[in-house]
Image (spheres, rainbow, N blue to C red):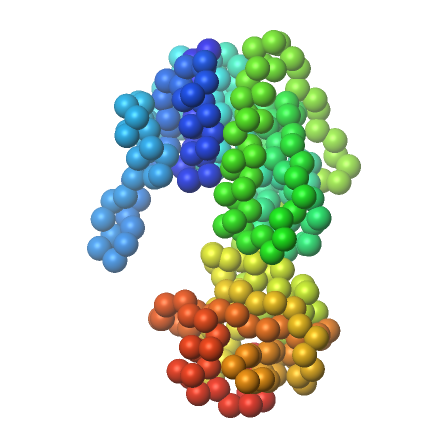
Amino acid sequence: MQIAVAATPEVALPTLEALLKSEHDLVSVITQPDRPAGRGLSLKESPVAIWAKDRGISVRKPVDQEELKLAVSEIDLVITIGFGVIIKEEILNLPTHGFINLHFSLLPKWRGAAPVQRAIEAGDEVTGVTVFKLDKGMDTGPIYRQREIAMPHKATTDSLLQNLAVVGAPVVLDAISAIEANELPVIQSVDGASRADKLSKDEGRIDWNHPAMQIERKIRAFYPAPGAWTTFRDEALKIESADVSDEKTGQPGEILLVGKELFVSTAEGSLKILSVKPAGKASMDAISWINGARIEQHERFI
C-alpha cells in the first residue's frame, strides 16, 4: 500500500518511525510550508519535514488545496496527524482508501483542535487515542481503532501529547491492517460528544475565585502555550507549575509567604506556586522570583 503522512508537529514522529520500520511503503510526507521563526524570522521547516529529509523520503509542502490534490492523487492512503489544514471533501475521496486521522482523545469526546488540553482542564481520569476515517465534519468520521489509557498524574499538555504520540503509533498500524482486511469502520456515536476548542491567551487568565484544584488543572492544560497567567503589580505573570495546598491564606488572589514558599489563596484551598515566567523574562522557580521581585506579605494576584 502506498502511504503518505500529512503532518506538521513532532507528535507525528513516533508514527512515522513505526511506518518506516513496518512492511508498509511510506512514499511521501506532506507538511505545512516553511514558516518564519525566531528573532530573525528566518524560514524554518516543520519537524516532520526535517525528519523526512534526513531519511530520504519525499517531502511535499502544498500552499493550497490544488497542490494538496496533486500530492495525494496517486496515494492509496493518507494519514493525518496535526496537519493543521482543513481538507476539502473532494480531496478526501481521492486516495484509494481515503484519509485516516490519529486524534488524541477518545472520540466522540473532545472533537476539535485542543483535545489534550481540554481533557486535562476538565480533570478527565482517562484519555487515549482514536484512529478514524476523515469526513467533512469536525472529527466526526467512523472509527477504526481506539486505545484508552489512565490520565497520567500531573500531566501537562506537553507531556501528555508526547505520551499519546507513542501510544498512537501502533494503533495507526493496527488501523492500516484493518483497512487492508476490508474491515469497515464503526460509525461514531453522538452520545458524549464534546468540543475541544482552541485555547486563547485571554482564556488563560486565572480567576482566583475558582477552586485551587480547578486552577491547578488549568495551569497544566495551558502549559507550555498559551500559558495560564495573572496580573501582579500591573504586569502579566505566567504561572507555569503549582501544587494544590491546604495552607490558609486569605481572600482569593492574596499571597502568603511561608519561609521560602509562595502560596496564593483561592475560593477553595490555596496553590503553592512552583515556577513562574515574568513578562519579558525567562522561566524561573518561585524562590528566585520572590527574591528578585521583593514580594511583600499579603500582596495580591489579580
- Identify whether 243 is placed above or below 254: above
Q: Where does the image place residue 60, in percent across and percent down from the top left?
A: 32, 27
Q: Where does the image place residue 260, in percent across and percent down from the top left?
A: 52, 81
Residue found 42% across the figure and 70% down from its top? 284
- Identify whether 255 is placed above or below 206: below
Q: Would residue 23 appear left or right of 36 to someone viewing this image?
A: right
Residue found 69% across the figure and 49% down from its top? 124
Q: Would residue 183 appear left or right of 64 to someone viewing this image?
A: right
Q: Where does the image place residue 280, in percent across and percent down from the top left?
A: 35, 71
Q: Where does the image place residue 227, in percent across and percent down from the top left?
A: 49, 61
Report which quarter residue 33 is drawn in. top left
Q: Residue furthest front?
A: 259
Report which quarter residue 302 is drawn in. bottom right
Residue found 57% across the figure and 15% down from its top? 177
- Identify whether 82 is placed above or below 242: above
Q: Is residue 138 visible?
A: no
Pick whichever, 296 or 138, lies toward us. Answer: 296
Q: Is residue 144 visible?
A: yes
Pick whichever, 53 or 86, lies toward us. Answer: 53
Q: Would residue 50 appear left or right of 260 to someone viewing this image?
A: left
State the count of labels: 0
Residue found 60% across the figure and 61% down from its top? 218
Q: Would residue 194 appear left or right of 39 to someone viewing this image?
A: right
Q: Residue furthest right?
A: 191
